[in-house]
Amino acid sequence: MGRIIDYNELWKLTVRRRFSSVTPEENAGVVWDKRAEYYDRSVSDNQKNALSDVALLDLRPDDTVLDMGSGTGRLAVPIAEKVSLVTAVDPSARMLMYLRENMIEAGLFNCRYVQKRWEDVCLKRDMEPHDVVISAFSMGFYDAAWALDKLHRASKREVYVFWFAKKRHDEDLLQYISESAGKKYVEKPHFPDYVCLLNILHDMGIYADVKIQEYEWKNSFMSVEDAVAKAILNRRITHSEKEYAYEYYRENLKPDYENRLVLKTRIRQALIRWNPDEQDYISTYV
């Protein structure tokens, strides 16, 4: 019996419908450069969560680890403390600049930096297979099967993919804006959650394990204006919606440390894991 649902085509359909934070005409590296400062601040705010994530990984002292979409090093830095080499791949020069600074601050010098989109990385030319390959909330590709296949081929022992389990960080903000404007809230099309990725992997002949975690995510801001500016920069709201966003942040931001204002959200994430040697899958992308 053939497949009733082609989950990779379902993924593609959803991606075509969603509002992208990076348009095809834009340089992805430049777009993410503008967001690097906020992302680095988020890394600092959520160090406890990062350490919990790293504790779930099978890491060994002699391991080489590839972090695809490393950002400013939320996972790469604590991983580098446990392994021999980390290769950080990210299209943003500014993200990698913060990552270098964070590695140096931690006294770590075992990280290699590759400023490229995952689409532009040639595994045979740019890097050798790594023992462990990680993608943490970096599966923002049109063709998920292609991206998963490339992660699979890049790994010698373990692949880990962190992805959303339904609710995202800013859903409460978007719902507040809709209701304040007198509209029924309709969730905007986004990437499907982890269940779709699991089914894509299953269709590929990869039978992955999954672990669901619930945790508190913090975002800190210098002011209400700073919070609204970040929401606009990330294209989660428009300029016409910013007055509602001001109201939301005035109601929900709480004073915390260093005179900052903090927004706390409880969310769930999925950790998908598989060992390439234990699968029936043979790549058709090579």
Image: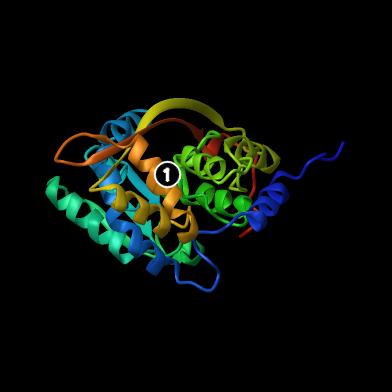
Q: Nearer the viewer, residue 259 or 247?
A: 247
Q: Nearer the viewer, residue 260 or 205?
A: 260
The image position of residue 151, as x and y in percent, is 50, 49
Instruction: Quadrant for the C terminus, please.
Output: bottom right
Q: Residue at x 38, y 48 (%)?
A: 246
The image position of residue 192, as x and y in percent, is 61, 43
> How many numbered badges does the structure rendering display?
1
Judging from the image, the colouring scheme is: rainbow
Task: Report the residue marked by disc 1.
Answer: 134
* Left/right of residue 177 with respect to residue 90 in the rendered view: right
* Left/right of residue 189 with respect to residue 80 in the rendered view: right
Q: In the displayed image of the protein, which residue is found farthest to the right? A: 1
The image position of residue 25, as x and y in percent, is 53, 74
Q: Residue at x 53, y 53 (%)?
A: 140
Q: Residue at x 76, y 45 (%)?
A: 6
Q: Nearer the viewer, residue 83 or 18?
A: 18
Q: Residue at x 29, y 63 (%)?
A: 94
* Left/right of residue 140 with respect to residue 185 in the rendered view: left
Q: Amino acid at mark 1?
A: Ile
Q: In the displayed image of the protein, which residue is found farthest to the bottom? A: 25
Q: Quadrant of residue 166?
A: top right
Q: Quadrant of residue 84?
A: top left
Can residue 284 be seen from the camera position used here? no
